[in-house]
Image: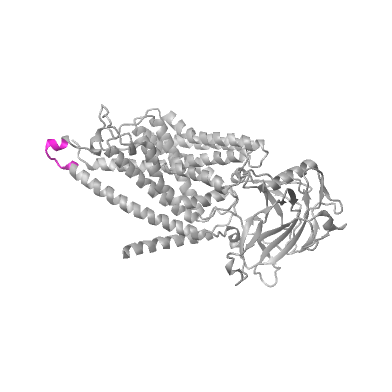
Amino acid sequence: FSFLQERLRYVLGLLLLLHSTDSFYVPGVAPINFHRNDPVEIKAVKLTSSRTQLPYEYYSLPFCQPSKITYKAENLGEVLRGDRIVNTPFQVSMNVEKKCEVLCNFPNKPVTLTVEQSKLIAERIREDYYVHLIADNLPVATRLEFYSNREEEEKKKEKDVQFEHGYRLGFMDGNKFYLHNHLSFILYYHREDVEESQEHTYRVVRFEVIPQSIKLEDLKADEKSMCTLPEATGSAPQEIDPTKENQLLFTYSVHWEESDIKWASRWDTYLTMSDVQIHWFSIINSVVVVFFLSGILSMIIIRTLRKDIANYNKEDDIEDTMEESGWKLVHGDVFRPPQYPMILSSLLGSGIQLFCMILIVIFVAMLGMLSPSSRGALMTTACFLFMFMGVFGGFFAGRLYRTLKGHRWKKGAFCTATLYPGVVFGICFILNCFIWGKHSSGAVPFPTMVALLCMWFGISLPLVYLGYYFGFRKQPYDNPVRTNQIPRQIPEQRWYMNKFVGILMAGILPFGAMFIELFFIFSAIWENQFYYLFGFLFLVFIILVVSCSQISIVMVYFQLCAEDYRWWWRTFLVSGGSAFYVLIYAVFYFVNKLDIVEFIPSLLYFGYTALMVLSFWLLTGTIGFYAAYMFVRKIYAAVKID
């Protein structure tokens, strides 16, 4: 028992260490120091909605525009996410207050929205769109205050504060639409320590907004673009009637507050997650379950195997050997090459490529080098790493193909380089056509698509060929027993040895070990949240690898005991069983958590989910296959065969 306590203490220590790495990160950009009155540029990123999953660029709606619109040059990750960062006409200066100012340059002349524009704004409000702005690379957030527990409300009036990314475009009341046309910006600065003779420098550490809807008649504007806000109680909201032209003013105010938050920890506000407790619970739960099961499985397998090997190696009477049953009987067929060895080795090559990419990305992100402050870095890194990991994918695929008595290595290399990426590219291209049709900024522009194709055929393909060439030339895997010339007959199998039953049984343990983490990943992808708990994710990934390997070994052992030697494809399929549960979970998440009703958003959701499930199946299938292959070689090397 004390040993178990020690073990748990060690695991908890490791978890704490990993958790502490979450808060530390290498910032994406160097801090910018502002002096008083320096301009702080406010840029727009995009409009998003978790109901439609279609991002739009800021000026797709008739907001006030600056005299010259300039778009920021973006990295690959930002383009794929649908970010289109652009300048806005907001004039904000460091530590300078503004009571109320009209945004468009004609103070007494309100903005007139045409019927078409009014219709579009009303539709976006109905679809629950949020506007995302940034100041000094910090995203804008709306503060939400609520009481954590109703009973405690009387005792202490402390409110829980959470932040929502962006601000709501507007709201609905009955069948009427109201637009948030006044923005109260609250910016927090941290005063840097400087020598006495020098001027103070400031850094932006938080960017909040309070959106308001104020009717045109209640906003009194003068010749100098100044306006006066009405009293909170007496003002009516700005209605947008989609059937006629609407007149309104876009206004904003700026308020500065000093803050103790240092620049290095300014992202903590955005990343505070109220559910870290669930993470701890799920991780400890997974660790205990996996250790417990691995202990049991290892004991059973090792004891049974020892018994098997001892029995097989006893040179007893010939009568006994005649009545042998179990996995030794199939020694002459267990390494017989399967059908379609080229496709199998290609899929396993892609699985190795994915495994290396995911491992490096999670590890680097855990060290804090891919924090949300460097926008799009995670996606860019993942794309480039997948291309460069083609060397390893090619090498493993080539060596396995040679072991399976394959001869056409050039065709095999081409298959490895194009099979999985081709499916991904095909699905993404079809989905992209639908997004183009909706004029969304989430559509990958044609030049980016050409660039991705050039990366695929210019970097990934040659690297896969290079790896495949060396893998194919290398000595094939050494199989401990010879294969008979005539294949042995396979006895009739019991119902529970069916492939689909195997998939259902094998998928439960790995899925159970990671499904709570899956909830947070889905929220990050589909509900525009930030995902940053890579320390947890790294641990979950390790647990996943261990549980996939164990399940795969158990399944292959049972199969060989039933004298069925066709284990190559079956192990690959069965080990990926948890992907089936991920698919079921994705359907459950779609029905219960998202308000998607239209056809194209649903198509996008299931299209991208299909890609995730396919990739997850390749990843877990590859892990399970290599674990089973090592196991099979090990056990047949341990028995004496005449």
Magenta span: chief secondary structure: helix
Q: Is residue 380 visible?
A: no
- Compared to residue 499, the image places residue 27 above or below, namely below
* Left or right placement of residue 175 versus residue 502 in this view: right
Which one is in front, 383 or 9? Answer: 9
Q: Quadrant of residue 77?
A: top right
- Compared to residue 191, the image places residue 513 above or below, namely above
Asked if residue 319 is among those painted magenta in the image, a careful observer would answer yes
Which one is in front, 476 or 587? Answer: 587
Q: Position of residue 460 (x, y in %)?
A: 50, 37
Q: Position of residue 414 (x, y in %)?
A: 46, 31
Which one is in front, 406 or 635? Answer: 635
Q: Position of residue 347 (x, y in %)?
A: 43, 36
Determine the residue positioned at 42% across, 60% down. 14
Magenta region: 312-321
Asked if residue 471 is among those painted magenta in the image, a careful observer would answer no
* Left or right placement of residue 221 versus residue 534 in this view: right
Q: Quadrant of residue 234?
A: bottom right
- Compared to residue 258, the image places residue 180 above or below, namely above
- Compared to residue 53, the image places residue 468 above or below, namely above
Q: Position of residue 452 (x, y in %)?
A: 57, 37
